[in-house]
Image (cartoon, helix red, strand yellow):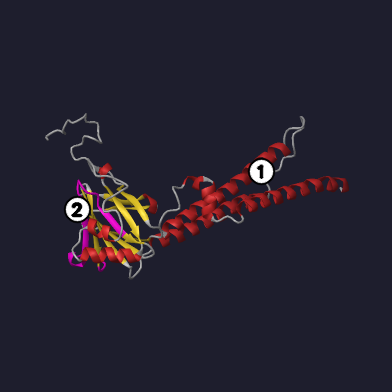
Amino acid sequence: MGARSSATRPRAVGRAAGLGLGGATLLTLLSGCSVEDLGKRFGHFGWPSRGITLQAHEMYDLWIASTVAALVVGFGVWGLIFWCVIRYRKRGEDLPVQTRFNMPMEILYTVTPVLIVAVLFYYTAIVQTNVDKLSKNPDNVVEVVAFKWNWQFNYRNGMGEGPEKTIASTVGSSDVIPILVLPVGETIRFEETSRDVIHSFWVPEMLFKRDVFPGNVRNVFEVTLDKTGRYVGRCAELCGTYHAFMNFELVAVTPENFDKYLAARQAGQSTQQALTAIGEEPYATKTSPFNTRRQAHTWNQGETAAAGK
């Protein structure tokens, strides 16, 4: 008995040392490293980027943390598999001792997955709730009106339906990409409606999109931008012939410049004039209008016109 104990003691010490070394290595990799730094170091683990809104940051952090947790569990499982392959490999023709069950082990591999799923579900529910949260008094309200195949953005002085609440409006056309100017650091409430079919309002850098329905269904969501710049917005729902070219451009500016822009629009200036007044390019710089004669962007040859033209 003493010989057996002395023989197993080195193995136990070796296992503890291995676990300690693995834990120390993992802590070394993760210490001094924010979630964003860790994501950048490993290509965001397949996630597009950290996004440009506070809500996008929460989703990004959840994704990175879940991926790291999955990798830790995966390495643990792989380690146990290889340890069993090496430790219990065949050493002769004698049949190994057969164990009918191991109650502690069965409890462990039953309870552990439940705990992992419960923790992931808990944090997922929190992030989802925060992303879908609506405030009672948002700083800005924008009505998004989608139609074949362009966008109208109405800046509003209150929530809910009614044309009397619109204080300025930007409408896209076949020749001019609509530009949506919004401030950073303020709560922005989007109220969506469609004039014809189902569309989908999507700015990829927001890491969020929501369908735009016709009729009396008004989808509503809120974001808070935290990064200035220009970003292409798209329709993410197949809506007809020119769906692929139904773009707009989001221009995120400082609150001061947004107030100047909105004041210029209310004073009767066009979108281009108001953009110039705050030092921005008057037209879209990240995307271009579609060709309504279907020459440059489709399979039609050269200067041939579409059927019926």
Q: Is residue 183 left or right of residue 269?
A: right
Q: Is residue 81 left or right of residue 258?
A: right
Looking at the figure, which quarter contains the C terminus?
Answer: top left
From mark 1 to mark 2, how far is it between C-alphas? 59 Å
Residue range in magenta is: 157-181
Residue contact between numbered discs 1 and 2, judged by CB atoms under 8 Å: no
The part of the image, by quadrant, that contains residue 221 is bottom left
Is residue 282 at all visible to an observer of this figure? Answer: yes
Q: Which residue is mark 1?
A: 80
**Outermost residue toward the right?**
2
Compared to 127, does 284 lie above or below? above
Q: Which residue is mark 2?
A: 195
| Image position, residue 128 (x, y; %) | 42, 58
Front in this rendered view, residue 261 or 83: 261
Amino acid under label 1? Answer: Leu
| Image position, residue 241 (x, y; %) | 22, 40
**Outermost residue toward the bottom?**
137
The part of the image, by quadrant, that contains residue 161 is bottom left
Mark 1 or mark 2, whichever is nearer to me: 2
| Image position, residue 37 (x, y; %) | 54, 52
Front in this rendered view, residue 280 or 39: 280
| Image position, residue 111 (x, y; %) | 59, 54
The part of the image, by quadrant, that contains residue 190 is bottom left
- The residue at 33%/70% (across/down) is 137
Amino acid under label 2? Answer: Arg
Specify few, some or many for label 1: CA neighbours under 10 Å numbering under 14, 14-19, or 20 or more: few
